[in-house]
Amino acid sequence: MTYRCRSAGGVGHSGRVLGPYRQLLTVRGLPSVLAWSLLGRLHLPGTPLATTFLVAGWTGSYVASGVVSGLYTVGVAVGGPLRGRSADQGDPARLLIAISLLYAIGMTALAFAPSLVGPGWWPIAAAVACGSGLAQPPVTQIARAAYPRLAPDAAARHSLFTVEATLQELLWVVGPVLIAVVVAVAGGRAGVLTCAGLALAGSAGFAAALHRTGLRTPVPRAGSPDGSVLRTPGIAWALAMSMCVVAPLTVLDMTVVAWARDAGSSAVAGALVAVWSIGSAVGGLVVGSRSAPPRLSRRILLMAVGIAALVPVLPPVATGSARLIGLVLAVGGVAIAPALAAANSRIGELAPPGRAAEVFGWVMTAATVGSAITLPVSGWLLDHVGPAAAAAGAAALVLVAAVVSVRVPVGAPESSGRNASV
């Protein structure tokens, strides 16, 4: 199931761009695993939206909504490594079925809490949300741990992680829109129940794809099975890098929404985020077609430059133009998916055999902690300085990630080479 790039001689531009993706489609089981892993994540970006509407409508308090959503996030962060370790040690398909059932039960209980108890009992909902976060199905971790088994060749692995990053950008557009429509039509309870159903159905489909592809048997673990995976050379630096790459994305989401709200055109925020995601998807599609291994630091540096380009077009530096901001987001977004793909690919190479899902669980924890730390700081900058300052802070954080990435070693010999590309 290895992947080799064909010669570009005699092939048109579209053939050179799409050729690697056609090759990936020929790997047995890979299209199904990738498709179901993405569907299994469709509920993720819409869950905070649905939870906020549910709790705010129940209690009339955004503080309560923030606490419930915050404890859900705490559960996700704490449970990430635990869920990943369980997937590495046992049958990931069976784990997905069991944990997605628990998650769906927890989210259903949260959805019906307003009908069962009064608003004063909302702390119970916070506890249920935390438990649901602990049981969030580890689809992302299991998928990223499975990719090297399906496409062990370095070129295939780089293209695959880029495809995933590209399509995930589209999920982060489709998911919130879908849940927003459900909430607008049927209310917050329907939104939360929809998230629960999507998680259950997506996890079941992904588990079936793993079964058909023969990925239910754990990979033999390297080293001491009880040793901390954080002691693996390069993993600590990789987690710091991930924290500084992912957190700025949530900061920019907040920045765009704040600018649109202050400008009196909140609806524009959704369009700007969509344009940003489309730019990222285009960048991922083009860069993912290259067979040479990516230069991680360069990709992250380009991401920092794209974010920094927002500073001159946002208040208080400039009055702000929706068209100009959208243009900068579209162009700067081209670097997002390639940078995320290169980071995840490098982390996958560093993960010890049989512990990849656990490593990606720690990546999720690092990203969540990074967002929890940076969002309050960004809120202060938005309140006291303006959107340009928040964008500058996000760019500075990505620049730190570029510096840290130099310390992240290459984990697989075949991933290094002279013809590295952006």
Image (cartoon, helix red, strand yellow):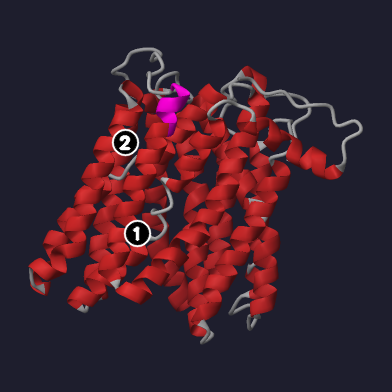
User: Does residue 348 sit above or below 63 in this rendering?
Assistant: above
Q: Amino acid at mark 1?
A: Thr
Residue carrying label 2: 96
| 111 relative to 385, above or below | above
Query: Quick one: label 2, few (<14), some, or many (20+) residues within 10 Å?
Result: many
On screen, residue 365 versus residue 67, left or right, reads right
In the image, what residue occupies the spot 57% across and 49% down?
A: 167
Residue 213 part of the magenta-drawn span = yes
Residue 109 picture location, percent across and down: 17, 57
The quarter in which the N terminus is drawn is: top right
Asked where in the image residue 55 lies, by quadrant, the reply is bottom left
- Tag 1's secondary structure? helix
Label 1 vs label 2: CA separation? 19 Å
Q: Residue at x 21, y 56 (%)?
A: 108
Q: Is residue 58 above or below residue 80?
A: below
Q: Nearer the viewer, residue 42 or 394?
A: 42
Horizontal placement of 73 versus 170: left or right?
Answer: left
Label 2 sits on a secondary structure element that is helix
Main structural element of the magenta stretch: helix, strand or loop? helix
Q: Which residue in the rendered view is the most extreme toward the right?
A: 10
Q: Quadrant of the C terminus?
A: top right
Q: Which residues are magenta?
A: 209-214
**In which quarter of the view is residue 116 placed?**
bottom left
The residue beneath circle 1 is 47
Count of numbered tags = 2
Question: In screen coordinates, is 413 left or right of 369?
Answer: right
Residue at 87% of width from left, 36% of height from top? Answer: 11
Q: Is residue 74 visible?
A: yes
